[in-house]
Image (cartoon, rainbow, N blue to C red):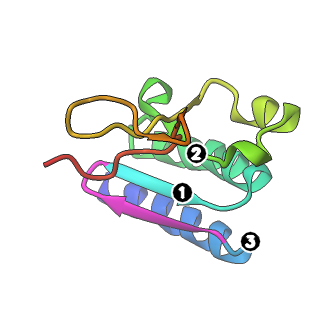
């Protein structure tokens, strides 16, 4: 299983490097960065590679972030069933900037 898991992450990294994107993984979390048309396609390929390791991505636990100025019909089409994440403070309330919820993903809860 470890060999297949390593291969899945190596494939993910290779594809993202080629399109000037990147990935960061911490324990059982991974953060993919890149242009929308690239990251969603790469995410699907990563999910297929993980199946070889008998693992599954959990779409219900996935979230994505994009500045509101760049959200459009193409974004909605690409993101599929992955939700726009809302950054929350330590009280669990949405962080607001100029009265609007800040969309993003909490990377550390202490």
Disc 2 secondary structure class = loop
Image height of 72 relative to 2, above or below: above
Q: Residue 65 bears which disc, if any?
A: 2
Magenta extent: 21-28
Q: Nearest to the eye among marks 2 and 3: give it.
A: 2
The answer to whether the residue labelled 1 contacts the one labelled 3, judged by CB atoms less than 8 Å apart, is no
List the residue tagged with mark 1. Answer: 32
Give the side of residue 103 with respect to residue 92, left or right.
right
Question: Alpha carbon of mark 1 to alpha carbon of mark 3: how far?
Answer: 12 Å
Q: Residue 19 bears which disc, if any?
A: 3
Query: Along the line of sight, which residue is nearer the eye, 107 or 21?
Result: 107
For the residue carrying disc 1, how many other residues have a C-alpha within 10 Å: few (<14), some (14-19), or many (20+)? Answer: some
Q: Residue 57 bears which disc, if any?
A: none
**Residue 46 image offset from top left, x and y in percent:** 56, 49
Residue 110 is a magenta residue = no
Disc 1 secondary structure class = strand
Disc 3 secondary structure class = loop
Q: Earlier in the sequence, mark 2 or mark 1?
A: 1
Question: Alpha carbon of mark 2 to alpha carbon of mark 1: how far?
Answer: 10 Å
Q: Nearest to the eye among marks 2 and 1: give it.
A: 2
């Amino acid at each position: 299983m470890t060999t297949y898991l390593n291969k899945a992450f190596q494939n993910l990294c290779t594809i993202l490097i080629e399109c000037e994107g990147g990935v960061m993984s911490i324990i059982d979390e991974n953060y993919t960065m890149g242009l929308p048309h690239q990251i969603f396609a790469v995410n699907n390929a990563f999910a297929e590679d993980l199946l070889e390791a008998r693992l599954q991505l959990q779409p219900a636990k996935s979230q994505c972030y994009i500045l509101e100025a760049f959200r459009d019909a193409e974004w909605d089409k690409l993101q599929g069933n992955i939700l726009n994440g809302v950054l929350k403070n330590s009280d669990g309330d949405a962080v607001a900037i100029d009265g609007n919820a800040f969309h993003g993903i909490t990377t550390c809860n202490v």
